[in-house]
Image (cartoon, helix red, strand yellow):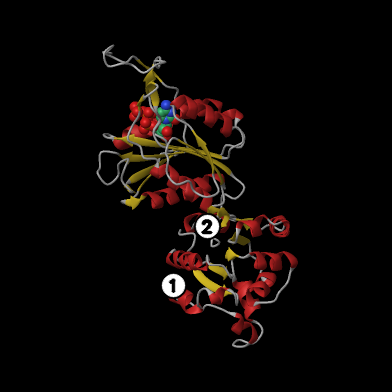
Amino acid sequence: MNIFNAKTILLGITGSIAAYKGVELASRLAQAGALVDVILTPAAEKFVTPLTFQSVTGRKAYTDADLWGGEGHVAHIGLGRGGELLIIAPASANTIARLANGIAENLLCVTALAAHCPLIIAPAMDAGMFSHPATRKNVETLIERGALLIGPVEGHLASGLVGVGRMEDTPIIMGAVRWMLGREGKLAGRKVIVTAGGTQEAIDPVRTITNYSSGKQGFAVAQAAIDQGADVVLITTASLPEPFGCRVVRVASASDMLQAVQAEVKDADGLIMAAAVADFKPVQAASGKIKKDAGFASITLEPTVDILKEVSHQRDGLKRLKFVIGFAAESEDLLENARIKLNQKKLDMIVANDISAADAGFEADTNRVILIHKDGSAESMPLMTKVEVAEIIITRAANLIE
Ligand code: CTP
């Protein structure tokens, strides 16, 4: 299920001090399971060596010596055809100019011309060079041809100045690679809404009623859907690192979440409600901070709207909606309670979990779930990471679309 596994990724390294960050990227890609073929330009070799990359990827790293010798003159064709993705990080102004103009003076640029795979460029250069009209035009040309531009971002530059020219951080580039690799997945072209985290119901401007939900399972579901090519809208209260490529809608209360889901569900193909939505909220939040001396003995609560029930009432009009998946967090009678929720909320599948187990609760990185389907069948899963649980949920969701 690991999206990086056995994928052949061409990683171009060009002449920039950020080449050392390219080593980290190569290492992370290799650790994730990808087969990383690194190609260094002559300028890159002044900053880092092929041996550095060979040591972290476990594979030969290519230089211009391979263009003119070694395997003869076909190294670039083999590399270009074999690559499932070409990423140039760091991409210097010079290499960007060559790519934009089809100039093939070194192995990396010849390979880029020969390759048919998607291209990601992560520029790194002085701010003035990046904002120069020549570079802007070259970058635009590459984007028009379908390249994905990542960064550069603002930061300290080799010149000692601060400006927009620093190569984007490795985790963001990894997210972009992941997004690109998933584009042809089973959910390609499908809009999937995922909710995550616990809602917050205001008591006054400084206090809320909330719950222990971390949002980890929902964020993992969003990432798994992106890995399968979905256009994901993540509606959330949680502040976890955002998966690359999804649209995040930040909400606080159950009523915010209801509004956001209703606005997005009209043209959605799927909805996965992993959020722990409050069932009750204060009837009226105090407009000012409630002072200790004034005291308050009780908070009067009223029920919130059940978002899944609301969607189920509208389902006949939601022509594109192929699956609705809910979660059931239970501390007793897991199966029975989850089945009741599946039927009452008219779900296609419910993910039931026992929140009283230490290794499967809100904060844990693991989960033990039972998937219950509309036809009544149930699949009991062993203890898994939340990432693995997310992948299984998305596999089942994709089956519901076919
Ligand atoms: N849910 C919802 N709107 C609410 C409450 C819950 O859409 N106001 C969704 C949750 O996101 C979850 C499913 O309903 O996917 C079940 O949530 P859960 O809290 O387990 O059940 P409840 O229906 O709230 O019932 P109870 O709290 O009594 O177990």
Q: Which mark is residue 56?
A: 1
Q: Nearer the viewer, residue 295 or 229?
A: 295
Ligand 1 lies in quarter = top left
Task: Classify residue 69 by image quadrant.
Answer: bottom right
Name the residue rendered at 48%, 49% in the picture.
Answer: 223
Q: Nearer the viewer, residue 203 or 130?
A: 130
Q: Which mark is residue 173?
A: 2
Asked if residue 6 shows in the view, the reply is no
Q: Which mark is residue 75?
A: none
Q: CA distance from mark 2 to mark 1?
A: 17 Å
Q: Position of residue 374 (x, y in %)?
A: 45, 38
Task: Classify residue 217 by image quadrant.
Answer: top left
What secondary structure is found at the residue carrying circle 2?
Answer: helix
Name the residue rendered at 51%, 78% in the picture.
Answer: 50
Residue type of the residue flagged with mark 2: Ile
Q: Position of residue 256 (x, y in %)?
A: 49, 27
What secondary structure is found at the residue carrying circle 1?
Answer: helix
Residue type of the residue flagged with mark 1: Val
Q: Is residue 382 above or below residue 298?
A: below
Q: Is residue 61 above or below residue 317?
A: below
Q: Nearer the viewer, residue 355 or 324?
A: 355
Q: Give the mark nearer the N terminus: 2 vs 1.
A: 1
Q: Residues within 10 Å of mark 1 (few under 14, many from 20)?
A: some
Q: Residues within 10 Å of mark 2 (few under 14, many from 20)?
A: many
